[in-house]
Amino acid sequence: MIYSLLKQSLVVLLYGCWARVIDIEDVCRQIQGSVSESSEVFYPGSDGYLRDIEHWSLSSSQNSTCSVEPGTIEDVAIIMKIIGNTRPPFAIKGGGHATNPGFSSTPGVQIAMSRFRDVLLDGSKDTVAVGAGCKWDDAYNALNGTGRIVLGGRVPDIGVAGLTLGGGYAYHTSQYGLAMDNLAAIEIVLPNGTIATVTSADEDLWFALRGAGAANFGIVTTFHFITHPQGDVWGGLVRLDEPQLDAARAATKRFSDYNVDKKASVIYRQDAASGYLILFYDGPTPPTGIFDEFVAIPSAASDLQIRDFASHIQSLAPFAPIEPGTNAFWGSINFVDYPIELQEYIQQISQEETAKLSALDPSFSISWFIEPFSSEYFEDAVDTTPASYPSSRDLALLPTFPYYGFKNASLTKVMLDSMQRTISDVRNKAVELGQDIAHVGEYANYALFTTPTVDIYGTENLARLRKIRDVIDPERVFNLAGGFKLGEDTDGVEVCSAVGDGTAPLEGVQVAFKDSL
């Protein structure tokens, strides 16, 4: 673990201001005595507490002083006001699929949105309200049989909130843009405790939430998504052995370059010595020629078939599994093309790192996820108003990420050094092959916590985000939470932050322990 799993009740914050001792247990008691019966506060040793601090990746979990499950938006507002007045470290957990330490976990007050799980399709079926505690499985299952769908996660167990607020690539992205481009409204509690419904009419906050809303500006409770027609789909998971990877790379390259059917989607997972393909078509029968090259590859296993969308998602559980006790990290590179030479280099460097790191930790695994989309997906987005991600929509970006998984937490620095070096080498290789991506921003939902915030949003968007932050959060309440922070707190406002700017989780925090677990 990156953090010691100890119980913190007194925290001394020393971050650009005088030292203050915060009794977090007292903050927990204030919350417990102020919220309604619809909400509940949990403490170490209870099942609710363990549920609230759990994350998909072990490296993302911390022992908090307490956890709270708000049950109403009014209680979220009460909690937000108490945190603003007392200023403990806090975190907001939606689906718990974040891999960055401290982004949705904290030694302070863990806010778990798990009671916001409603999925309500409106009478016209044009929009659906989805609670911020939902996973995409919840939304897809609720919409199953209605003939409607929303844009969201492509494998099971992904949280609605984090994916949407960071951007949100989906199977339907080539048709309709990102998940955040298919929002009608967002219900949110602002840092001062004000309850608001934000739409595209609120130009600044709409811009900020769509791309940078996971770590700043407030606590989202409900998303109102625009829905789209959905019938049965074709597709599934294909597992490949190493001899078939050359053919998979060639097919992925040709699909990326030549496919014009925006209902078709492919994800290629390349491991050190094997691979997986997810093939998807938004309809029961893909036209001849789209997937023929993929289907012709001899497979170790294949599950391609016609089924409903929710069943398609559930069938993909083997694509991104994680064993208990695994520390998992992602990194981000946005490409504009997938030349075969680049894909080969990715496998070569993966094999080199596997040989070195598996000798230190036999549980180590590395995968690269390659995701071709239509070159027009930004143009085809339902909502084309400005958003904080990406820094420019002039270029269709192809989100790509490495996955590192390992169980020996004492090797975390070694693993992260390897990941950062690998990302740099692969990016340099792409530039060498002619891709103009040296200054292309990264995707927040994949980016490692060491990524400078400016590398995600770009200089111009970051400057605008800071101006919006100055209005929405003048007291810098959200500097007490994790995530990619906006920086430049030089306006005289007292800031005692529990995190840095995306370069080091919990930088500047000293903990005085009352007792330990």
Image: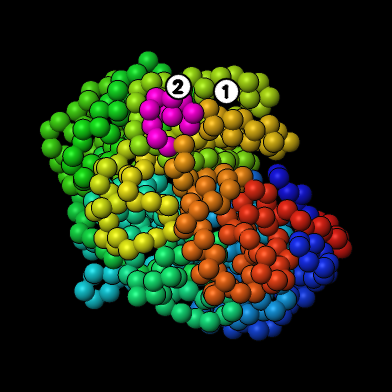
Residue 15 percent across, percent down from the top left:
76, 61
Q: Is residue 263 left or right of residue 94?
A: left
> Could you classify mark 2 by the number of other residues whose Cα lies within 10 Å: few (under 14), some (14-19), or many (20 or more)?
some
Residue 47 percent across, percent down from the top left:
65, 62
State how the image is colored.
rainbow
Residue sitting at x 57%, y 45%: 451
Q: Amino acid at mark 2?
A: Tyr
Q: Secondary structure at mark 2?
A: helix
Q: Is residue 224 left or right of residue 281?
A: right
Tell me if residue 325 comes above or below residue 89 in the rendering. Answer: above
Residue corresponding to mark 2: 345
User: Residue 336 occupies which quadrant of the picture?
Assistant: top left
**Residue at the farthest top position:** 243
- Of residues 436 and 158, the one drawn nearer to the viewer in this rendering: 436
Q: Secondary structure at mark 1?
A: helix
Q: Which residues are magenta?
A: 427-437
Residue sitting at x 53%, y 41%: 330
Residue corresponding to mark 1: 354
